Image (cartoon, helix red, strand yellow):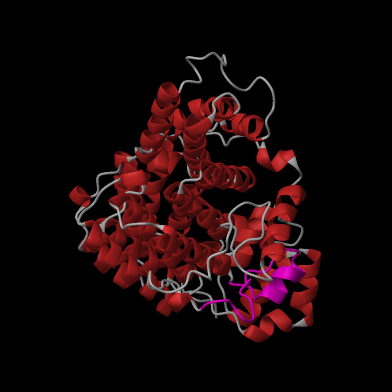
Amino acid sequence: MPGRASDPIVVPESLWQRPQMIQALRDRDIRTVFLLLRQYAGASQTQIAIACAMTQGRVSRTMKQGGRQICSLEVFERIADGLRMPDPARMTLGLAPTDFIPTQPPTSATMVITSRDEPGGLAPATPPGSLDTDPVLPGEGDTVRRRTFGKLAGASALSAILADPPTGGTPLQGVEAFAAALTDQPGTGSDPGPAVLSLSRLSKAVAAAKRNYQDCRYSTVIDGLPTLLTDLRTASGTHEGDDRLRVEALSAEAHHVAASILLKLDHEGLAWIAADRSMQAARNSQDLITIGSNARILTHALMNDGHYGAATNTAGTYAQHIDHQADEYTPDFLSVYGALLLRGAVAAGHRSDRHASATLLDEAQEAARRLGGDFNLRWTAFGPTNVQLHRVNIALQLGDAGSAIDQARTTDLDRIPLTERKATLLMDTSRALAQWGKHDKAYEVLRATHHLAPEEVTSRPSAHRMLASLMTASPPSTQIRIREFTAEIGMSS
């Protein structure tokens, strides 16, 4: 008997090993996969739709004999993630496995942070971070890097990177310009005169890009950042000495913004290139805190690509590195150090590693206590409140919707100075409410997110998927409101 819409699908492990399922995965026959889920897991079309972030109508059409079949790699990955396919099933479907944890990791995730008095041998002499160098984990780096570049090369080359922007008023028209800037195509910068390439002008431009990103003005960032990236590359070849080091630090921050916004918009290929450029420039700056700060985006990119083990260890290793190398615990150090620990905690949460996640959160909480308040040093937004926001997100990743909502209730929005952080909390709260079956409240919180930061909802594919999931799971009265809302903001429901 098909399950209720609010019930998660429980797939028997034996189902993935049935010859019919193996053949269906090998043939990428999603119709048969769905039919087998109905037969052996009792999954209804609505349950499948919710799990796979699809509409019930799409699932119904897929399951019909002779219906339109699924061919998109992105949808295959969404289905695999939603059904929690084990790695052998994912690989039979032609996807990369999710488990990249080494058999004997160099350090336990629960022992990532050590005393400053202990030897710093765990941190490599040259910090990892570029796709040119060996990543953090011995034995794992080649696999991660190979899969990452395989994904870039295998996604129909530039057709995936330069995909047409979705319709419906989303501010993605300028995303293609990032491809030109990140691949060093000529003619992508502005007039390379002394005034344009001055440290003063470049510093102000990078700061403006950071502020616009943190204010969720993504279309403004997209409009100006590709040109700025090219100007910074030109400036690095014209300045010398300390000025050049400063340009490299600015370039690292600008590429960090580029990677962050590209990850939000699901442009993973370009995001990886930007993250790599960010770390290259950070190392070129020879500034320890800049290196640590920009390691956050590498960790984010690894998480976004499903490499949660590598992401956890990358964050921990960089935190160790700057801890052992720093001369003193300055506010900038504590902010970057704490922000790295939070990234590691989130990655551990994605792996369902509760102990490691809790340990890293507690370490971050201690760094926030020593910092003494909520600040935005080195653009980290780090402080006690940001730790609380991450507790909400991690509880959500661990499937503890009630705990996530309780954590959110105790968070004072007025203490969050950045729009992007507020919007993230609201989006996480909406997901937790939906996970808890409170679909009407989840919709209300999503509307509040749009009121606060419109582009966080209209621009992000993840927000579109949330709306589609709510549409299929909500009662009819809420479905009507969602349909009206999506029409109001220019999105197709």
The answer to whether 200 appears left or right of 15 in the picture is left
Indicate yes or no whether the magenta region holds residue 295: no
The answer to whether 349 appears left or right of 57 in the picture is left
Instruction: Give the camera-side residue of 11 and 456.
Output: 456
Give above or below for 364 relative to 21.
Answer: above
Name the image quarter holding residue 34: bottom right
Q: What residue lies at 78% left-to-right and 78% top-to-bottom? A: 20
Residue 264: x, y in percent? 49, 46
Q: What residue lies at 69% left-to-right and 69% top-to-bottom? A: 90
Give above or below for 365 relative to 37.
Answer: above
Residue 448: x, y in percent? 29, 46
Determine the main secondary structure of the stretch shown in magenta. loop
The answer to whether 170 appears left or right of 481 in the picture is right
Q: Visible in this render: residue 171?
A: no
Magenta residues span: 84-107
Residue 431: x, y in percent? 39, 60
Instruction: Give the camera-side residue of 169 and 281.
Output: 281
Residue 182: x, y in percent? 63, 35
Classify the position of the N terminus by image quarter: bottom right
Q: What residue lies at 51% left-to-right and 20% top-to-bottom? A: 197
Instruction: Give the camera-side residue of 295 and 39.
Output: 295
Give above or below for 169 relative to 19.
Answer: above
The number of numbered badges drawn on the structure is 0
Residue farthest along the bottom direction in this orientation = 14
Q: Visible in this render: residue 189?
A: yes
The answer to whether 491 appears left or right of 20 in the picture is left
